[in-house]
Structures are given as C-alpha cells and as structure tokens.
Image: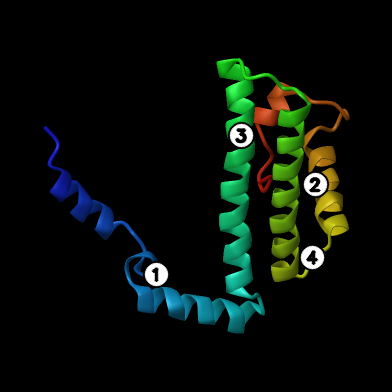
Amino acid sequence: MINFEKYKEFVKEVTSDASNHREEMIQRLVDIEKTYGINPSLLMTAAIGLSSESGEFIEIVKKAVFQGKPLDKDVQFHLKRELGDIMWYVANACRALDLTLDDIISENVDKLKSRYPGGEFNVHYSENRKEGDL
C-alpha cells in the first residue's frame, strides 16, 4: 500500500523553491520582469487562461464526439465564443512577449515547413523530429 504522506514529502522535495514558497515565486516574477522585460502577471494570465479556455473548448468537442451531443448551430456558436476567449488570451501572451500574431503564424509556418520537407503531413517526421525541433 502506498503511504500518501510519504509521497507528499517526496513530491515536495522534487518541486522547485518557487513552487513551494511564495517569497521565492515573487522573487522569480521580479527577476523575469527585470531580466527579460516581460510582464509576468500578463504572461501568467495568458498561460492560465489559455489552459482553462482550451479546456472549455475541448469539453464541448468531447461531448459531441464521445457522448453524442449534437454539433448544431448553438453548439458551434458556443465553440466560436470559446475560440474568441482563447484569442483574447493569445493576444495577452503576445502583449507579454512583445509579439504580433503575424510573428507567431510566420514562425509556425517556418517550423512546419522544416518539419515536413515534402510539404505534407508525414507520420515519420511527426514522431521523429530533428534536434532542436520543439
């Protein structure tokens, strides 16, 4: 049987100081802003928001695919609204990182052209990436 208290202690030991201690996290946020000129509050808003809004979008799709919920006009409208929320957080991420949507799309096109040299999807290249291909 697993000793959950012992596991919690193990987890604590393998967790960063910034995650375990508020003061360390605050200092890390200050360091990020000073060192990189990135607004950490805006970056965290974007990261957390993207995750939660993507989860809402995924939940709707899951119910349509696995539970038989219809993808009627009302549900499509709901998906559209969730995508709008996702875009709001993408815009905040762009603000935090001083990027434009063109920057992001251009980089994505370059990455995919490099990953798929034939210009079309290939499972081999999808699963066997070159070094440095994130």
**125 or 90: which is nearer to us?**
90
Q: Earlier in the sequence, mark 4 or mark 2?
A: 4
Query: Which residue is at 80% across, 54% downward?
Result: 104
Query: Which residue is at 30% across, 56% downward?
Result: 14
Q: Residue furthest front?
A: 74
User: Residue at label 3?
Assistant: 58
Query: Could you tell me if the residues under marks 4 and 2 are in contact, i.e. CB atoms within 8 Å?
Result: no
Q: Earlier in the sequence, mark 4 or mark 3?
A: 3
Residue 36 position, x and y percent, is 64, 77
Give the amino acid at mark 3.
Answer: Ile
Q: Earlier in the sequence, mark 4 or mark 1?
A: 1
Give the amino acid at mark 4.
Answer: Leu
Query: Which residue is at 58% across, 72% downward?
Result: 41
Q: Earlier in the sequence, mark 2 or mark 1?
A: 1
User: Residue at label 2?
Assistant: 108
Q: Earlier in the sequence, mark 3 or mark 2?
A: 3
Position above or below: 45 against 9 = below
Residue 109 position, x and y percent, is 85, 44
Q: CA distance from mark 1 to mark 3?
A: 30 Å
Residue 132 position, x and y percent, is 67, 48
Position above or below: 17 against 85 = below
Give the amino acid at mark 1.
Answer: Ala
Give the amino acid at mark 2.
Answer: Asn
Other-residue count near label 3 (Cα within 10 Å), few / some / many at <14 / 14–19 / ≥20 = some
